[in-house]
Image (cartoon, rainbow, N blue to C red):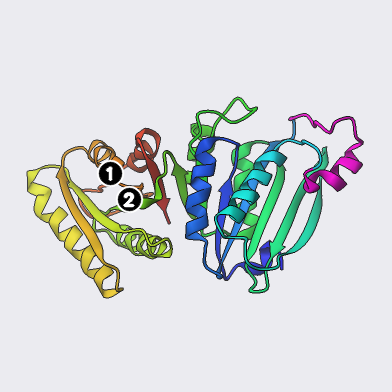
Amino acid sequence: MNEQDAQDRFRILVCLDGSDECYQSLKYAAKLGSGVDADIVLLYVRPTDQGLRSGGLQVRVARENMLKWGIELPGIQYLKKGRDMLKDLGVMSGEEWKEEVVHTDVDGDPLGDNKINYVNEQGKMVVLKLKVATDIATGILEQWELGEYDIIILGASSRWKGMARSFWDPAVAEKVAVHAPCSVLVARDLDIGHGHLICTDGSDESMEMVRRDAVLASRCECPVSLMSVALDVEDEPKAKENIAKAEKMLNELGIEVEETIIRTGNPVEEIIEAGPNYSLIVISESSKSGLQRFFMGSVAFKVMENAHNSVLVAR
């Protein structure tokens, strides 16, 4: 089995940078991907201009031994810690895991791309991937093209270890959120026990987002709450209608809605204010109709940039 052969499975890409935030997000990914139908890929992107610390070994020797964790190369310690966490969390325990080491040459870089595939008897896969790219965001998006993931998770770290930029830089987080074809979770202080706050405007795109995230939340047994924001008092009946419509749809899917919230005012401010009571805020990237274009312009990304907690841009 390799990344291209598993497109019918639920696939999670977790981007690691060594920060506390990325490992908090990994705990969420472990719960989300605990089922036998889910695969988890841990990714560290190493820009081509980042020097190799091979301890004096030739690059060929370093490459052959790097994934045995005997030497320190960029990103290896982060991937190793992520793998060990998945073992401690029970994702990689209890069964025999077959191990496959794969190397891919990359022009202009002596180390190239390297990964370990771990596969158990039930076909569940955990992958550790050390990838080379011109920049971090490009590397993450290129990785999606190799595997077509259902969700990409990035820790909103205050800095990229050893790098000038962090995931919480528009050049990385927003580029991934804008261009990735799948859902993108930018994780900040992610506490998985408080549920998903799903924001809806009643449009067809937003309703599909509600459905998709409710199914996602059910994978990790996370409670679901619904929120709609009216721009003014005149729009409040429409906001109530949006909530009722979304709640009815979820009930028909057998998903219980824990709480419904209707606010009036600036959508960005109202969503951000309500957000900290939940594990994460769920928003759709755009909307062409509904409550006066609730997600008009860059509202979704303003929420992502300024929220105090995690934000999932759902697709």
Q: Is residue 62 magenta?
A: yes
Q: Sequence order check: which comes first, mark 2 or mark 1?
A: 2
Q: Which image quarter: residue 39?
A: bottom right
| Figure quadrant of the N terminus | bottom right
Of the residues shown, which amino acid type is indicated by label 1? Asn
Q: Position of residue 5 (x, y in %)?
A: 67, 69
Depicted 299 relative to depicted 219: above or below:
above
Residue 245 or residue 190, whichever sits in front: 190
Q: Position of residue 170 (x, y in %)?
A: 49, 33
Q: In what element is the residue under mark 2?
A: helix
Asked whether disc 2 touches disc 1, contact meaning CB atoms under 8 Å apart, the reply is: yes
Q: Give the tally of numbered discs.
A: 2
Q: Which residues are magenta?
A: 50-69
Residue 194 is tagged as 2
Residue that numbered label 1 is attached to: 277
Of the residues shown, which amino acid type is indicated by label 2? His
Q: Position of residue 15 (x, y in %)?
A: 58, 45
The answer to whether residue 202 is left or right of residue 30 is left
Residue drawn at x 31%, y 59% is: 223
Tell which residue pokes out farthest to the left in this image.
234
